[in-house]
Amino acid sequence: MTLEELKEEKALLEQTRKNILEGGQEFQTHDGRVKQVDLNTVLSRLAAVDQAIASYGGSKGNTDTVLLKFGGMG
């Protein structure tokens, strides 16, 4: 996954977490009961995505480009 994809997934996971906390794991609709994804599953994936983002350098502004450091010549 690219850093941008990870950030998009993180935003979706954070919104899902918020929805679960505000509305609960299950709710009733006209068509029946709806059960959302388990909060622990969301939190686990969110932690994994945060770790993956950190491996890109987090908020340091790094991209998918490989950064190389060259020693001085001559």
Image (spheres, grey):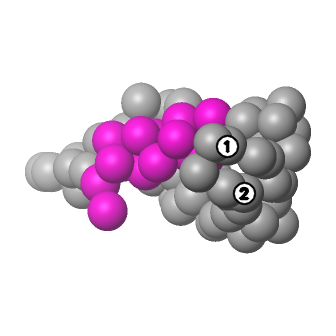
Q: Is residue 59 above or below residue 32?
A: above
Q: Nearer the viewer, residue 2 or 42?
A: 42
Left or right: 41, with 55 as reference point: right
Q: Nearer the viewer, residue 65 or 21?
A: 21
Tell me the kind of residue under disc 1. Answer: Thr
x%, y% of residue 63?
30, 42
Q: CA distance from mark 1 to mark 2?
A: 6 Å
52 horizontally vs 66: left or right: right
Residue at the image point whose x is 78% and y is 47% from the top: 27
- Outermost residue toward the left in this view: 74
Please provide the residue range marked out in magenta: 1-16
- Residue that badge 1 annotates: 29
- Res 33 quadrant in image: bottom right
**Quadrant of the image occupied by residue 40:** bottom right
Query: In terms of secondary structure, where does tag 1 sit?
Result: strand
Magenta-span inclusion, residue 54? no
Instruction: Find the residue positioned furthest to the front.
Output: 30
Nearest the camera: 28 or 14? Answer: 28
Q: Is residue 29 left or right of residue 63?
A: right
User: Badge 2 is on which residue?
Assistant: 33
